[in-house]
Image (tube, grey):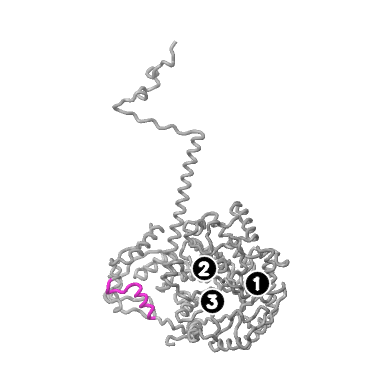
Amino acid sequence: MNNTNNSTPSQDPHLHTDHYFPNPIHPQPRPNPRRPRGFAATAAANNSAGKGKKEREKEKERTKLRERHRRAITSRMLTGLRQYGNFPLPARADMNDVLAALAREAGWVVEADGTTYRQCPPPSQLGSFEARSVENPLSAGSLRACSVKETLGNQPHVLRIDGSLSPTSIDSDVIAERDSKNASASPINSVDCLEADQLLQHIHSGVNENDFSGTPYVPVYIKLPVGIINKFCQLIDPEGIRQELIHMKSLNIDGVILDCWWGIVEGWSPQKYVWSGYRELFNIIREFKLKLQVVMAFHECGGNDSTDALIALPQWVLEIGKDNRDIFFTDREGRRNTECLSWGIDKERVLKGRTGIEVYFDFMRSFRTEFDDLFAEGLISAVEIGLGASGELKYPSFSERMGWRYPGIGEFQCYDKYLQHSLHRAAKSRGHSFWARGPDNAGNYNSMPHETGFFCDRGDYDNYYGRFFLHWYFQTLIDHADNVLSLASLAFEETKIIVKVPAVYWWYKTASHAAELTAGYHNPTNQDGYSPVFEVLRKHDVTVKFICLGVQLSSQEADESLADPEGFSWQVLNSAWDRGLMTAGENALPCYDREGYKRLVEMAKPRNDPDRRHFSFFVCQQPSLLQGNVCLTELDFFIKCLHGEMAGDL
């Protein structure tokens, strides 16, 4: 009997002996490893798929960063070209528009389909350069030996028009061009030629910056001081008011603006409205035939500093707040802000049986009924609706009483129980109940964006949870505006309604726009946070009042806070104008010098706007004209410029 255990491989005809005894001279290749099966195959497939998914997610994030970077560069280029070069770029211009405008400026021909080619100018024109300014073209001698042909022929090709050029490569070229700005390779930097800044300065010098004659007439209103009516709704100094109005008439002021404080009129008992002091004041204004705009002020005055409020919310509301502190906005540490009521109670019957928007509507309806005669005769030309902190449509995220100092990012104000319930409902409807919380890495009032995990570059503000939370926070602001304005339209039918939007321009150059996020505007670099707001305002046909800075930030301040007031203003105003909304302006701080007034006039009537749009009116915040620190000559200059009466020789 043969023992199978003793059989050698050579005895088996189905086996090749070289597999078992490899030739040392000719080594045989090792067989391929066996393919995994069963659970091993599943695990290997999952591991491979997981790696592929991670790589795809990383590539998506890199693509997002490149897109944000590209948009930021495009935005700055558009702002500079419009402001300093007077380029007629459309409001929603893209990189193609920028390249086409630059190519045409350099003498190239750019057709509608993108075809670009050089068109040689006649020899008689090679020695001169025709500037864009119609009013003062540059002469040939101003550029001396530097001709257009020579400059363009010797200039290095930094940006090339190529169909295969990707956004990333465009960004790289733009950065390279910026980094090599000081290089002397181009003849434009030679001694015989003007620098680009000098060229623009030379062009603009031909336009008389004081000449606003023939420009549109923009009415000017002056805001009356806060303390002229006391907490018992009594007019304090009627004769002083008359003297103030005499000065306004001498300056040709169109009208005045006055705050009607909820904390004064309904200060002591719910639905007990006292208007006596306002009636006396309105009668004096009527004597001088001035227009009147009134503000429904549902916030406190003086709440943005460490001192006691000059005008608080109604006393009966504060009494309710002692037992139910959640009627006020609340920060992460549980501190309550009594500057205005939380939007979480807009539809909660916690105010003696009334909801928040019912309280606002009753106040507005009482005013409309009390002064029906003034509406009928046209004395009251418009009504401004206070929608949040400082009367602006924003959360009270920058309260100095809470320790905030510029340029801190502020804090989210959503920790009262009513807004928290709203957040829980939103998270549950999304299917992620664990998202029902505020961010725990958003810093404090005075943090910088890069110091936080939420607002830093690639921070949580742009992940799935961050976008959900910010959208909910933003939507709460929009819903509050929609609810209140719906009732305001009923109370003030056929009367112009005004809404004031804030100017949160610090940290505007960062990707997250942290200060705007805490104020309620979801406006990071890769998203437009003002279009949804203005869609609601257009629905109610309101006028948008924009806060104008009026002062020039120092380079150090702008660098420290990455502020961009010009870029911010351009985005907000164009977003409103693109939706057909009327706009108005109000200076954030009192101005006393001519340079400040010129900046305000330029914002009210932008010269570089190709559509020649302008403010419908301007509100000038000034201390009493009877005080000696107000220069009436400069104020008169400002008013005449807005009225279109200022000639260049004045």
Label 2 vs label 1: CA separation? 24 Å
Q: Earlier in the sequence, mark 1 or mark 3?
A: 1
Disc assigned to residue 240 = none
| Residue 628 magenta | no
State the image coordinates of residue 200 (x, y, percent, origin top left): 37, 75
Disc assigned to residue 405 = 2
Q: Residues within 10 Å of mark 3 (few under 14, many from 20)?
A: many
State the image coordinates of residue 471 (x, y, percent, origin top left): 56, 60
In terms of depth relative to the viewer, which is nearer, 301 or 596?
Answer: 301
Residue 531, can we see it? yes
Q: Which residue is mark 1?
A: 313
Mark 3 and 2 residues: CB-CB less than 8 Å, in contact?
no
**Front of the two marks 2 and 1:** 2
Q: Amino acid at mark 2?
A: Arg
| Residue 203 magenta | yes
Residue 475, can we see it? no
Q: Which residue is mark 3?
A: 586
Numbered disc 2: secondary structure: loop
Q: Is residue 140 above or below residue 171?
A: below
State the image coordinates of residue 328 (x, y, percent, origin top left): 64, 65
State the image coordinates of residue 614 (x, y, percent, origin top left): 51, 77
Q: Amino acid at mark 1?
A: Leu
Quarter of the image where the C terminus is located? bottom left
Say which residue appears at 46% left-offset and 53% top-offset. 60
- Range of residues picked out in magenta: 190-206
Q: Is residue 315 above or below residue 222?
A: above
Say which residue appears at 48% left-offset and 39% top-offset. 45
